[in-house]
Amino acid sequence: MNILQVEHLSKSYGEKMLFNDISLGISKGQKTALIARNGTGKTTLMNIIAGVDAADSGQITIRRDTRIAYLRQNPQYEAHMSVLDILFTGDNEFMAAIRDYEAALEHFRLEHNTANQHALDTGIARMNVLQAWDYETRVREILGRFGITDLSKPAGEHSGGQIKKIALAAALIGNPDLLLLDEPTNHLDFEMIEWLEDYLSRESLTLLLITHDRYFLDNVCDTIVELENDSLWQYRGNYSYYLEKKAERQAADEQSLEKSTNLYRTELEWIRRMPKARGTKSRARIEAFNNLENKLNRRTEEKSIRFNVNANPLGGKIIEVNNICKNFGQSTIIDDFSYIFKKGEKIGVVGLNGAGKSTLLNLISGKLRPDKGNIVTGQTVVLGYYTQEGLQPVEDKRVIDIVKDVAEEISLKKGSMSAAQFLYHFNFSYVVQHAYFSALSGGEKRRLYLLLQLIRNPNFLILDEPTNDLDIYTLQVLEEFLADFPGCLLIVSHDRFLLDKLCDHVFVFEGEGRIKDFYGNYTAYYQHRTHEIRKIQIGRSRMRENETQTVKENKGTSKPTYRQKLEFGNLEAEINNLELEKSQLIQQLNAGGTDANALNRLSLRYAELEQLIEDKTLRWMELSELIDPS
């Protein structure tokens, strides 16, 4: 049985048809990815399913009592709202239970009567059933994985990436039955993406997501739905299966196109020599011809993007980085880093968010100056720098005018092209070219910004998260261009597939300003890192085993010291007191009658008690073997 059913849905904006008469069913536990070109309606379809937007026609049916959480591509919150405000205004049963309990408690405090007492009892019972008393503790745990620890900090003081993480945490915390995610991996570092992959793969929730991360698609999704030519195509399998089956479908389409072209030639000849008198059969044949002509014209208009612009030649000296250091306040971002760039090399930059990746790019591009050391740039170097912030035009111009401000005529490897032809070649229709920048989708803005860097014919490309908001089709072509790019490439990206395909080696930000040059692609680095972590874990495990064995070997010959005996005696009393406090704390949590702040303090103290009891019990067991070996 489907948990979500989309039937005969259509949506257009003005003359632009996004999708027409599409239908889709998602069953419980199914993990589905929606892929399409930028500007074709992915986010609009997600908004309609979430109830944020309305379709022109069609129907959406969601099974009764289904809890839905929706992560928008660019979530927006009022600047004064704290992290807790954002999370505690979430629309899920946990938050509803807490809000109802708080309201009932406030009413009971104002007036002690039977109705208010009943409402309070009902609220407490619901909190107990949902085990919602420790909800905020779980909130803190998930936020901790996202590196967000100050829950009182206003949204206006968080970066766009942090806001996206808070919104993602809010979507996950509510334990939804149906989870809608629009580009969830944007602004996440590798460790967070891998954690999210693992979380979504294990959970039994139903998932519909939009993402350009192909490894994420492969590792999480079991169904791929493609929105193409106003229609939906569904593939039961992961991304690799989709690529295989789509290639088969395209091959079949090519055969069909060849047959249609031959039929079109025959019918065109008939149309040209057809007598003026038109019977019923003639009108039907003419209508069929017109439909065939429209189909072939649409296929002809489908153009593949090709980034085939020129690159200025590079001289012998490119960029030399000599012992640079950079600090912000008390934080060391880069400490004594040196490197000499060589012609044609492609380098990835990886590390946790906030480690300093963008700072390194800004230093190399000249936007920042190092505190120590220097950077020497060769005379033939022409930099192209694609920043995370994207294109920020001074005024809201038309797309064609933005390109003409850079170049009226674009030089290609063979010949040249006008600005309008160039934009059309890169999938900006003439209608879109005369639209204002503000009317473009997020992906279209990103693609335009990327093209503006390329038409300057750079020979040293610096790309800071170029894949955010780009569709998979544009990514594939971008990869082809970058693979053939004859100049130097320095790229920060959380797209593991892209780094694996392009990079010879990676700069790894290890923390405290250290940058390691690792030779190999991202997967090689990840396997190396996993191996090193495993070695450390095995070493720690062996140390614990050796310590335990030493205690066992010495317990017959070594006598406990006075301090050890005293500690042993005190531990028994301490553990008893902690267990008593834990028991009392559980009673307080189950009894209710306290506000959310007090519940938060009780929950945190409960977690502390659990850890203290475990630690002290382990120590008591170690000492008991020494003091009483029998």
Image: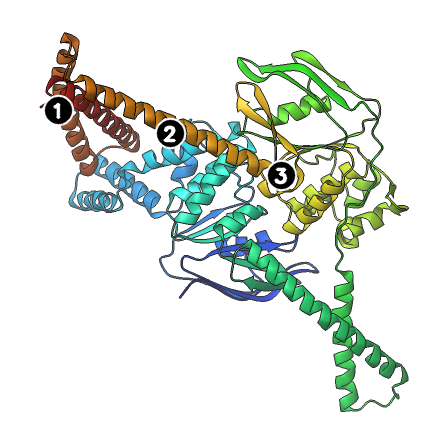
Q: How far apart are marks 1 and 3 (CA)?
A: 55 Å
* On screen, residue 473 above or below 150: below
Look at label 3 and name its amino acid. Answer: Leu
Q: Which of 287 and 216 is in front in this view?
A: 216
Label 1 residue SS: helix
In the rendering, at what x and y percent does residue 88 appear? 38, 38
309 displayed left or right of 527: right
Q: Residue at x 43, y 47 (%)?
A: 200
- Which mark, residue 516? none
Q: Write down the residue under mark 2.
A: 538
Q: Write down the residue under mark 1.
A: 576
545 displayed left or right of 167: left
Label 3 residue SS: helix
Look at label 2 and name its amino acid. Answer: Ile
Q: Is residue 617 visible?
A: yes
- Which mark, residue 499? 3
Quarter of the image where the C terminus is located: top left
